[in-house]
Amino acid sequence: MLFRIAIVGAGPAGYFTAHALQNAQTDELTFQIDMIERLPTPWGLVRSGVAPDHPKIKTVAKVFEKIAKEPNFRLFANVEIGKDVSIKELRDKYDAVVLSTGSTIGKKLGIAGEDLANSLSAAQFVPWYNAHPDYTEVEVDLSSDTAVVIGAGNVAMDVARMLALNPAELDPTDTATHALAKLHESKIRTVIICGRRGPEHASFTSPELRDLPKLEHTDVYIDLNEIEKAQARAEASGEIDKELRNNLAAMRLIAEHEKKGVARKLEIKFLATPLEIKGNGKVEEVIFGINQVESDDKIISTGKTFSIKCGLVISAIGYEVGDFAGVPVESGRITNIGGKVEHNLYVVGWAKRGPNGVIGTNKSDASDVVDLLISELKDPKESNGITDLLKSGHEIIDQAGWEKINASEILSGEPHGKPRIKEVDWKRLISLGRA
Ligand code: NAP
């Protein structure tokens, strides 16, 4: 039997869903997989999220392209749900619809001054430096000497590194051309990451932490005293798990490594809750409350404060899904049980479980949802899928079109020693795909 499955969103979770479906095929059970994507380009966060100075992480795109080459896979990029087709129409035409739309809205701090100019969310700043066509116009002012990054996760670390690196290190990367030009003129020399809890509670991962002392043109600081106190607290509360042990060891390495005495500095501070962003029309200062860790791992305020003068604030405190074409949303995720939303509607990835886990986490997650989906399939529908739904003349980017865009970007990068130069203009992307 042949079942038609629509996957909405061409990021890692979408591709791993397609892969799980491909792997589940037998002589009796086959799938036509149509992947629908709003942008003219696929790969989701691998294209517009992963930091440009971490190109190794992006090699997973080769896996995506292999999945896309299978004869039962079709790409329909440049198709927007809610505008070009509705979820309801897809559910009528397909045996199952899987939403893999991620979470794209940056969580808000909810403090005074958050809306001042140059107070940005990582949900704007990251796609800006990664050439996402919707974020080219984000106003980023890098004319002050200090930037504050709020949050103690890997996105905060990516953002801080991008600001603290010598921009020449980004020349051989696929950083957006507009962002690279701005970063070259940046006056920022001190970047301070502030986490609200202790080092033992940070969500950084140790490989990322261990990379920091290797930065060639930036000195990285963590207060050794804070790490030792965190270590003692963690030991006092029982056995330290491997992940935490590695994280604390990596932080100690940062604290203890010899500084180069260079002008570019990246500092990680803990136990600092942002209370207010101050400034006359534009960010000038952040006021933090100082916290302490109680014996039961609870964080309480000491009632004391400190402030950092800075001209840029980026909050990297997590993401949530926005209003999504009538699909129920709860606590920043699409409401689901084990990936099931409603009859023949499923969800995978960050939209399902919230913004956590690395790219590989989506593999097992998608595979579990595909198992559930297959167990609920009944009689296959007769339909041509999305081709019946799109208005005549609607220009889609299919796999062949995307391969043209991909080849053109790679070719433009070659003379500059870059992996690619990303095209940011929506219309030009479409014409490249048409060429
Ligand atoms: P995250 O790991 O959940 O970190 C969010 C941080 O924001 C936490 O430190 C959290 O502190 C803090 N936070 C939340 N609300 C706050 C508030 N109101 N005020 C101050 N701080 C607040 O999220 P993420 O950094 O966005 O990363 C998302 C996922 O992508 C993670 O799984 C991450 O590992 C992954 N990622 C991986 C890589 C990589 O592998 N290289 C790169 C980027 C992202 P609390 O803990 O106190 O809530």
Image (cartoon, rainbow, N blue to C red):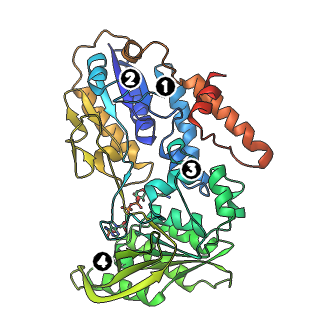
Question: Does 260 sit above or below residue 174?
Answer: below
- 278 or 229: nearer the viewer: 278
- Quadrant containing ligand 1: bottom left
Separation of residues labelled 1 and 3 (CA atoms): 22 Å
Q: Residues within 10 Å of mark 2 (few under 14, many from 20)?
A: few
Q: Position of residue 287 (x, y in %)?
A: 38, 81
Q: Which residue is mark 1?
A: 75
**Front: mark 4 or 1:** 1
Q: Residues within 10 Å of mark 3 (few under 14, many from 20)?
A: many
Among numbered discs 2 and 1, the one appearing first in the sequence = 2
- Three-letter amino acid code at disc 3? Asn
- 5 or 76: nearer the viewer: 76
At 29% from the left and 49% from the top, the residue drawn is: 353
What is the number of the mark on residue 25?
2
Do tag 3 and tag 4 residues touch (Cβ < 8 Å)? no
Separation of residues labelled 2 and 1 (CA atoms): 19 Å
- Which picture quadrant has residue 391? top left
Q: Secondary structure at mark 1?
A: strand
Question: In the image, 130: left or right of 119?
Answer: right
What is the number of the mark on residue 130?
3
- Three-letter amino acid code at disc 1? Leu
Name the outermost residue toward the right. 415
The C terminus: image quadrant: top right
Separation of residues labelled 4 and 1 (CA atoms): 48 Å
- 416 or 311: nearer the viewer: 311
Question: Does 152 sit above or below residue 43?
Answer: below
Q: Residues within 10 Å of mark 4 (few under 14, many from 20)?
A: few
Among numbered discs 2 and 3, the one appearing first in the sequence = 2
Residue 29 visible from this viewpoint: no
Q: Which residue is mark 4?
A: 239
